Image (tube, coloured by chain):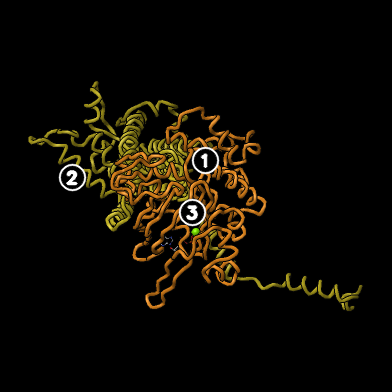
């Protein structure tokens, strides 16, 4: 949590599409990708959790991160919006370039980053407030102008939850079912009008019907948003994602280290029908992990 | 059916066997003894409390029937029939005011800093452990500290006369009690803040809230009931402490305050209910009933304060 203090001293507005910054030519990704990761490493203290990740996240598409438990999918996902700053021991190196700006440059304000790059967590985590206040919280702290009622309604409609909750907006969000809570968390993320939505196993606590609704929702949302999703459900990844990244754990017995690496990153079609790496094939056919 | 006759079918044999095994199950006698011991200790402590309370209530009742509310509005006196607790009540409330104004803001702010802002390093841990230890320091030690620092160092000017705090004054006692409860406030508030789930904070940061916004709008409201509970403990403790205020030099009975300015009053001599009780308890047996009545008044005030805080806490909880 400490890094945050220094960072919040400087406020930098990240441009939607990056202006030509001199000397940044090398950083500039092609227009079709929102993120480009260059040699990203994450350490927790002396534990090397994720090694040397280089990948591009395409704009307005769904990118799925899959791989066995502990391979660092969540860790990597939390680099996309500097959520790792909240873990004191976590240290990120390399660059996470978002629309031409390295999010880990010292002048970048992590708070502003998270407004543009929203996050939905594995377990639904409503604030202990009313449904309305849950959605309105983000716009309020970010000073988003406009009629708050309309904003709340629009976010809930986008998250396909409006019809179920329109009569009980003032009720506590904990009264919703798990699936409804998760869609409310998606609505909460949408309400601040982000550019990207990160989802860490958003369906793991839900039944198949609720999961299917969220999958439909993601497919609708990708018209407007770039989505990066971590999932353990291979069918889900195959169904919803345009591109799929497969990670695995590299175990070094001698140094007793377990490090996450990116094995293969391709269109979902290719990963699930004709992977080029044998480890990917073993994983998706269920022979491993 | 005759008792000795074998049961008609196998099903009822099973039933009988089950019944027998349930009925003749060997009791865990050690467990029973333990249960009895626990019950006896509960009864014993209840009996002691009832005995003390009936003693206090008896005295309080006699004073009430004799003098009514006069007892509450009269000041100190050498005559038991004329002695009242008004000065004690006023003193206690003033001291509580000091605690509320000083210890609560400083204590809650410290807790927020320790939990939400301080780096997670050895220094922070060291500070945490020491604050925790301070809650266990006997109150008489705080009294000595107050005597040395507030009464002597800040209380006497070069001519050994009343300085900043006015020596044995309301200010010195208020400051001492504030310092005494500060660790309690910090520890209970820090625990309440720590109990707020991490997922709530993450959700807040996830929509682009700053640390201050997360703390103010999410963490503190969630922690408020716990923090209030801590402040209840602190107030009750401050109201009941006798040792530190006696050390600092509370008046134990007979003093009159003339027409002084507010600051002069704060720098002037003081008393509080525990000091009044202490003073009367050492008097002749005529004072026995008024002492009991004063104890009763202190109890009522403490219960009222606790009740208010519990009410506040419930209100906060309902808002969520
Ligand atoms: N806060 C932390 N402190 C220390 N080590 C951590 C922390 N979080 C994760 N790790 C370690 O980093 C590695 C990667 O963890 P991560 O949570 O990113 O895996 P994951 O791929 O998301 O797993 P899962 O699929 O089970 O969620 C694991 O070995 C884990 O033990
Ligand atoms: Mg994970």
- Report x, y in % for residue A15: 38, 39
Residue B148 bears which disc, if any? 2
Dot placed on the residue nearer the N-terminal end, 3 or 2? 3
Q: Colour of chain B?
A: yellow
In terms of secondary structure, where does tag 1 sit?
helix
Q: Is mark 3 within 8 Å of ligand 1?
A: no
Local secondary structure at mark 2: helix
Q: Which mark is residue B45?
A: 3
Q: How many marks?
A: 3
> Which x, y percent locates residue A79?
41, 53
Q: Name, please, the residue furthest toward the top.
A: B259
Question: Circle 3: is it few (<14), some (14-19), or many (20+) Cα within 10 Å?
Answer: few
Residue marked by disc 1: A190
Q: Pointer 2: residues within 10 angstroms few (<14), some, or many (20+)?
A: some
Looking at the image, residue A222 sits to the left or right of residue A252; the answer is: right
Q: Chain of mark 3?
A: B
At a point 40% along the width and 53% down the height, the residue shown is A84
Q: Is residue A229 left or right of residue B288?
A: right
- Is any atom of residue A76 visible in this view? yes
B58 or A259: nearer the viewer: A259
Which quadrant: the C terminus of chain A? bottom right
Mark 2 to mark 1 CA distance (whole Å): 60 Å
The colour of chain A is: orange
Marks 3/2 in contact by CB < 8 Å: the verdict is no
State left or right for residue A266 relative to residue B27. left
Q: Is residue A175 left or right of residue B55?
A: right
């Amino acid at each position: 949590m400490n890094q945050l203090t220094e960072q919040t001293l400087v406020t930098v507005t990240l441009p939607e599409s990056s202006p030509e910054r001199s000397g940044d030519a090398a950083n500039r990704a092609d227009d079709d990708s929102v993120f480009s990761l260059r040699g990203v490493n994450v350490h927790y203290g002396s534990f090397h959790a994720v090694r040397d990740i280089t990948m591009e996240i395409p704009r307005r598409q769904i990118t799925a991160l899959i791989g066995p438990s502990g391979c660092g999918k969540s860790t990597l996902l939390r680099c996309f919006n500097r959520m790792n700053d909240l873990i004191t021991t976590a240290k990120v190196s390399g660059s996470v370039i978002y629309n031409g700006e390295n999010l880990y440059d010292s002048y970048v304000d992590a708070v502003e980053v998270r407004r543009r790059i929203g996050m939905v967590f594995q377990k639904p985590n409503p604030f202990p407030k009313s449904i309305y206040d849950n959605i309105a919280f983000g716009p309020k702290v970010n000073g988003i102008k406009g009629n708050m009622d309309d904003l709340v309604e629009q976010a809930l409609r986008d998250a396909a939850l409006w019809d179920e909750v329109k009569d009980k907006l003032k009720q506590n969000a904990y009264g919703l079912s798990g699936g409804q809570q998760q869609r409310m968390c998606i609505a909460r993320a949408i309400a601040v009008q982000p550019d990207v939505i990160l989802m860490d196993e958003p369906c793991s606590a839900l039944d198949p019907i609720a999961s299917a609704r969220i999958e439909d929702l993601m497919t609708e949302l990708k018209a407007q948003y770039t989505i990066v999703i971590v999932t353990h459900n291979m069918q889900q990844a195959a169904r919803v994602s345009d591109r799929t990244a497969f990670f695995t754990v590299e175990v070094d017995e001698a140094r007793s280290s377990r490090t996450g690496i990116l094995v293969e990153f391709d269109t979902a079609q290719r990963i699930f029908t004709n992977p080029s790496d044998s480890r990917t094939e073993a994983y998706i056919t269920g022979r491993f992990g | 059916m005759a008792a000795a006759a074998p049961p008609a079918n196998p099903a009822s044999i099973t039933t009988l066997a089950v019944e027998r095994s349930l009925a003749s199950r060997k009791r865990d006698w050690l467990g029973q003894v333990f249960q009895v011991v626990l019950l006896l200790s509960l009864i014993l402590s209840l009996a002691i409390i009832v005995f003390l309370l009936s003693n206090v209530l008896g005295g309080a009742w006699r004073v009430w029937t004799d003098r009514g509310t006069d007892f509450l509005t009269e000041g100190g006196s050498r005559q038991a029939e004329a002695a009242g607790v008004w000065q004690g009540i006023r003193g206690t409330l003033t001291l509580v005011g000091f605690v509320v104004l000083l210890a609560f803001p400083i204590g809650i702010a410290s807790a927020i800093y320790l939990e939400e802002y301080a780096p997670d390093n050895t220094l922070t841990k060291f500070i945490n452990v020491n604050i925790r230890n301070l809650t266990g320091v006997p109150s008489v030690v705080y009294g000595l500290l107050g005597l040395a620092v507030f009464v002597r160092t800040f209380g006497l000017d070069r001519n050994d006369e009343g300085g900043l705090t006015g020596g044995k004054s309301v200010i010195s006692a208020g400051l001492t009690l504030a310092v005494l409860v500060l660790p309690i406030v910090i520890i209970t508030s820090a625990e309440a803040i720590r109990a707020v789930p991490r997922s709530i904070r993450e959700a807040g940061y996830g929509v682009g809230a700053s640390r201050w916004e997360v703390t103010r709008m999410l963490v503190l409201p969630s922690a408020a009931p716990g923090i209030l509970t801590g402040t209840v403990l602190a107030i009750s403790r401050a109201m009941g402490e006798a040792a530190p205020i006696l050390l600092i030099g509370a008046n134990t009975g007979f003093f009159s305050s003339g027409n002084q300015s507010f600051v002069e009053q704060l720098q002037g001599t003081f008393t509080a209910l525990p000091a009044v009780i202490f003073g009367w308890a050492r008097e002749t047996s005529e004072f026995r009933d008024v002492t009991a009545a004063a104890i009763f008044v202190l109890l009522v005030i403490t219960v009222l304060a606790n009740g208010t805080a519990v009410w506040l806490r419930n209100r906060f909880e309902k808002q969520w």
